[in-house]
């Protein structure tokens, strides 16, 4: 007799008939790990519960926004209060001034900021601004970095595409893709060479200051500083995509951590406290080019949405006084102990961690760029993912993603995760689990 179908399986079948692939964002479909996605009913703190009543310790955290954990009481209260006052006006609000003030105060390079509704929209707008400001068209990005799904950035764009095994996307005009040069992450020499030959055509270099979309890859010493020098010398702009790292790697994001000031910064995720938001900001002279102050058109019906802004403000208020060091230590302990479990089981792993984001790559070598990330054994990751899921730990359903630890992850969650990891690595090492 076949086992009874779960509610998740039934929902996934219904979803596939109505929604492409059954999901509203590809990586959710579990294609990278096999099996069916869990449909989530609710979540609280560090734990999510699926429609079948199974509760998991969550290291996806909505792919980064939930640094405070799920349904933080103060954030929920702020959302409820804001929603009761009306969900959208299409007119400016005091909240937009407050969140802008907080972002400008926190991020060293940001003097003015514009809110949008997603990270994709924010990057797209920053790129348009960079092109307008420089009068140039070419764009430099790094293989394995994901900057949302705007046409000019869907070139060697990491996680989602890597999971599906596709290099780019049909539908992106070749003429658009040709304007984007993709270089190896952490390879300053190749950037230097490109600038020598094509520097005068390059509008901007866009980079994740800590890569999070090929798994976590930290910048090599001097890499970000080198990009700063190259762009400055050639009149191109440096854009930091801090959609993941903003307010995660400390209150000043990656730019404060590494002491490098980009011209433009892109934000998303945490600044909306789990509601849809994005933002781009930077030097006042550049931001003055945005409509209606300047000619670069950019707009949005729901931009600066009062409910999202309220969630964001409350999140930033809490983070302003939060103990990022403790979060860092907790993540460091978790990664250290999980690595010990892998070593004890004789499973080869390579771990990258910056602050509260980390990835376990199933490979022996160090992972420093997209090519080395791709050498990791994605099938072993898939097996590990399912072993962990069985033990009620929910990791990202793809080998090329970051795991996120939140401030709601407590010591008992870490201990439970390490226990699950010990058994999962042992299961992987068992002869029957070997390929
Ligand atoms: N930039 C980075 C670094 C991201 O990780 C993402 C999404 O994961 C984006 C941009 C796009 O943001 P959104 O999914 O809100 O459009």
Image: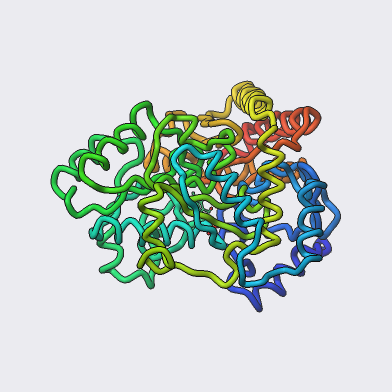
- Looking at the image, how many numbered discs can be counted on the residues? 0
Q: Nearer the viewer, residue 236 or 190?
A: 236
Q: Is residue 10 left or right of residue 146?
A: right
Q: Which residue is pictured at 25% across the width and 62% down the height?
A: 178
Above or below, 228 against 74 in this view is above
| Residue depicted at 46% across the width and 51% down the height | 281
View extreme (right): residue? 53
Position in image of residue 266 (x %, y %)? 47, 50
Residue located 49% across and 69% down the image? 299
Answer with left or right where residue 391 lies relative to residue 88.
right
Taking depth in this image into account, of 132 and 339 the one nearest to the observer is 132
Q: Could you tell me which quadrant the N terminus lies in?
A: bottom right
Residue at image position (36%, 69%) is 172
Which picture quadrant has residue 356?
A: top right
Residue 287 percent location from the top left of the image: 41, 55
Classify residue 229 as left or right of residue 426: left
Taking the view exactly as shown, the residue that stands out farthest to the left is: 197
323 to 267, vertically: above or below: above
Does residue 345 appear in the picture of this structure? no
Residue 409 drawn at (x, y percent) = 75, 35
Tell me the quarter of the picture where residue 103 sits: top right
Q: Is residue 155 visible?
A: yes
Residue 184 is situated, as x and y percent measured from the top left of the image, at 32, 42
Q: In this view of the protein, which residue sits in the foreground, 430 or 72?
A: 72
């Amino acid at each position: 007799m076949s086992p009874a179908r779960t509610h998740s399986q039934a929902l996934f079948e219904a979803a596939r008939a109505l929604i492409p692939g059954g999901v509203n964002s590809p990586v959710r479909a579990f294609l990278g790990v096999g099996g069916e996605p869990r449909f989530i009913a609710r979540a609280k703190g560090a734990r999510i519960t699926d429609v079948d009543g199974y509760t998991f310790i969550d290291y996806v955290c909505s792919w980064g926004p939930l640094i405070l954990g799920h349904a933080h009481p103060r954030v929920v209260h702020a959302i409820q209060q804001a929603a009761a006052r009306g969900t959208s006006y299409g007119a400016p609000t005091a909240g937009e001034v407050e969140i802008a003030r907080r972002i400008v105060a926190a991020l060293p390079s940001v003097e003015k900021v514009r809110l949008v509704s997603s990270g994709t929209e924010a990057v797209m707008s920053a790129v348009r601004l960079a092109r307008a400001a420089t009068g140039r068209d070419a764009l430099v990005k790094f293989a394995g970095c994901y900057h949302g799904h705007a046409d000019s950035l869907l070139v060697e764009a990491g996680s989602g595409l890597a999971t599906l095994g596709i290099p780019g996307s049909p539908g992106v005009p070749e003429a658009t893709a040709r304007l984007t040069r993709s270089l190896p992450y952490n390879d300053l020499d190749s950037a230097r060479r490109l600038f020598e030959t094509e520097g005068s055509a390059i509008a901007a270099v866009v980079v994740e200051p800590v890569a999070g979309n090929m798994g976590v890859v930290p910048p090599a010493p001097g890499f970000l500083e080198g990009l700063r020098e190259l762009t400055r010398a050639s009149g191109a702009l440096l854009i930091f995509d801090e959609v993941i790292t903003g307010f995660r790697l400390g209150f000043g994001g990656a730019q404060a951590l590494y002491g490098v000031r980009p011209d433009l910064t892109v934000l998303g995720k945490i600044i909306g406290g789990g509601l849809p938001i994005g933002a781009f900001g930077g030097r006042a002279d550049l931001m003055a080019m945005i409509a209606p102050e300047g000619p670069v058109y950019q707009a949005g019906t729901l931009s600066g949405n009062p409910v999202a802004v309220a969630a964001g403000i409350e999140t930033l208020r809490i983070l302003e006084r939060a103990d990022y060091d403790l979060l860092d230590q907790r993540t460091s302990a978790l990664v250290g102990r999980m690595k010990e479990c892998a070593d004890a089981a004789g499973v080869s792993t390579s771990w990258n961690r910056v602050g509260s984001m980390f990835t376990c790559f199933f490979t022996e070598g160090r992972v420093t760029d997209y090519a080395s990330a791709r050498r990791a054994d994605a099938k072993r990751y898939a097996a590990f993912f399912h072993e962990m899921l069985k033990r009620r730990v929910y990791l990202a359903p793809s080998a090329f993603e970051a795991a996120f630890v939140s401030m709601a992850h407590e010591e008992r969650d870490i201990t439970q995760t390490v226990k699950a990891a010990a058994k999962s690595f042992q299961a992987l090492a068992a002869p029957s689990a070997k390929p």
